[in-house]
Image: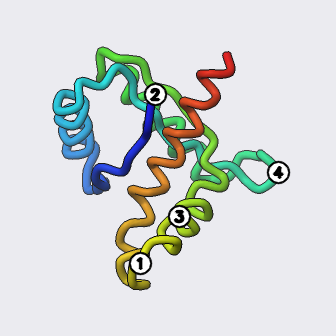
Amino acid sequence: MIATPVRTLQRTSWKKLLSDIKETVSEFDAVAVVVGLPLGFEGDEIPMTTEATDIARKLSLSLEIPVFLQDERVSSYEARGRLWQRPKSAADVRSEVDSEAASVILSDFLARLGKS
């Protein structure tokens, strides 16, 4: 399996985010949703950890497919590295880093799943 960037969903409201996620799940016939779990450098919880776990909990109550959390500590760093290896401008890298980081998070999740 290969994880590729699709698009970045904006969190303007919970209702809109849920609608966008349901649409994406349907479009790609997804069997699960993976939510990035922000952690501190040492793996400790940070303020955004609570927000991500709350979103995952709400999604698990709202969707009919499983929702998983995946450590995202190095995803943005790796995403920037991947994007810089391609012929892209700095503006393109900035605009694509979130979707590329999501691809990294999904790749890490799939690799972890494969080791189970």
Q: Earlier in the sequence, mark 2 or mark 4?
A: 4
Q: Which residue is mark 2?
A: 57
Task: Please identify, in this view, whether the residue under mark 2 or under mark 3 is nearer the observer.
Answer: 3
Sequence-wise, the earlier of marks 1 and 2 is 2
**Quarter of the figure with residue 65:** top left
Which residue in the protein does label 4 denote? 42
Residues under labels 1 and 2: Cα distance?
39 Å
Q: Which residue is mark 3?
A: 82
| 3 vs 4, front mark | 3
Disc 2 and disc 4: Cα gap in Å? 24 Å
Q: Which kind of residue does numbered mark 1 sit on?
A: Pro
Which residue is rendered at x = 67% and y = 16% of the image?
116
Quadrant housing residue 109: top right
**Residue 2 x/y as whole percent:** 43, 37
Local crowd size for mark 3, using a 10 Å CA cut-off: few (<14), some (14–19), many (≥20): some
- Whether residue 15 sits left or right of residue 72 in the image: it is left
Q: Which residue is mark 1?
A: 87
Q: Amino acid at mark 4?
A: Glu
- Single out the mark in the foreground, 1 or 2: 1
Secondary structure found at label 4 = loop
30 lies above or below 80: above
Q: Amino acid at mark 3?
A: Arg
State the residue lying farthest toward the right.
42
N-terminal label among 4 and 1: 4
Relative to 87, residue 45 above or below: above
User: 40 or 6, which is in the foreground?
Assistant: 6
Q: Amino acid at mark 2?
A: Arg
Category of crowding for the residue at label 2, using alpha-carbon neighbours closer than 10 angstroms: few (below 14), some (14–19), many (at least 20): some
Label 2–label 3 contact, CB within 8 A: no
